[in-house]
Amino acid sequence: MIQEYLFVGDEHKAEVEKYAYKTVKTEIYDIENSDCWIATFSLDGENEKSATALSIVHEYVMSHFRPTVLSNGCSAYYNKALYPHFNEFERKLRKLLYLKSALSNDKKDSETIKDLESKDFGEIFTLLFSDAQFVQNVKKSVNDKTWQFTKDEILTALQHITENTLWDKLIGENAVPLLRTDFAKVKDYRNDVMHAHSMNSSSFSSAMKLVKKINEQLDIEIGKIIVEKMPETQSGEDFNTAISVAIKDMDAAKQTKSWQEQLAEIQATISSIKGDGIISALEEYRRLASSPEFASITSYLQSSEFAAIQQQIQEISKIQVDIPPALKELQEIVAKNKVDIPPAVLELQKTLQAFKPDPAITEWARIVKDITGGTN
């Protein structure tokens, strides 16, 4: 197991060479034609004992010298050791939800389970442990305070705001108690493991102890559901109905947030533009958009008169599509019946063959479609 660090300059080289911890082996490698060098600390064996020793070395090196980490063997070991336990946790959590859905009074379990399967771990945690109404009430409570409030005032205000999570309503306040109280820690540890974040000996020990205990409690809760067959929710609500409504609300909130983020990006981009000409153009657009003329144009585009123009343009466009097959059919009739073509029909044939649609009409038809969103 090995730790590798990149240093620039010789400022800490002597100190690093002298540093020793138990039986950890230290080596220094210079990079030719540069002022960079690499320090490695290693121990034989891929086990927790070696990882613990190298974790102590890592904390010392980072706190004293702050080099660039090239490889972190102890953290990699912790990630690998924790992964199967957090994978087991996620599978058991989903199993609990799917069983609840299947045994719900509302027989829409297949649809509900499909919706849950489409959500990632973060979304499921938000669904179960975050109360959107509570968040709104907290924001309102803080925003309504117009004075220089104190921390104690905020904490007091929070104590009077009720929080009702989906977990408490549908699973129960006493179900899997460690997950209910420490779900934020579980989420953070799980993200560290799944995304290969750096971990030390202390966080590894805490994460392992927590996830093992939660998995045991999940087994107990799953066993209760299977034995009871028809588990009641804490609030008396139907599980599938409540979950479906919550998922729709969450998706709607995410969509709203997405639009808000896009608007914020546009506003930030506009505010960063320094060109006077572009700023003037934006101001002119705002003036036009708020003018009666702009409003009347918008109204006209939605009027019956404009709809009639659209219809005429579409008919003209359709004629140019219909002309070739009409000519072909006319020629086949004449050939089949061996009749003389009346002069008027010959004239019509020449007119149709000579017809060339005005490009302006075609372009106008495209513009109209763009303006109206292609709805007509």
Image (spheres, grey):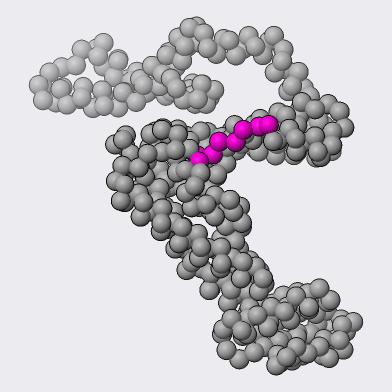
Residue visible at 29% across and 46% down in the picture: 229
User: Of residues 169 and 80, which is closer to you in this image?
Assistant: 169
Q: How many marks?
A: 0
Q: In this view of the protein, can residue 111 be seen by the observer? A: no
Q: Is residue 225 visible?
A: yes
165 is within the stretch colored magenta: yes
For the record, the magenta segment spans: 160-168
Q: Is residue 305 above or below residue 358?
A: above
Overall secondary structure of the magenta stretch? loop
Q: Residue at x 68, y 82 (%)?
A: 54
The quarter of the rendered structure image containing the C terminus is top left
Residue 24, given in percent of the width and then of the height, sits at 70, 90
Q: Is residue 321 above or below residue 131?
A: above
Q: Residue at x 54, y 22 (%)?
A: 371
Q: Position of residue 143 (x, y in %)?
A: 76, 29
Q: Reply above or below: 304 against 236.
A: above
Relative to the observer, which residue lies in front, 301 or 64?
64
- Quadrant location of residue 23? bottom right
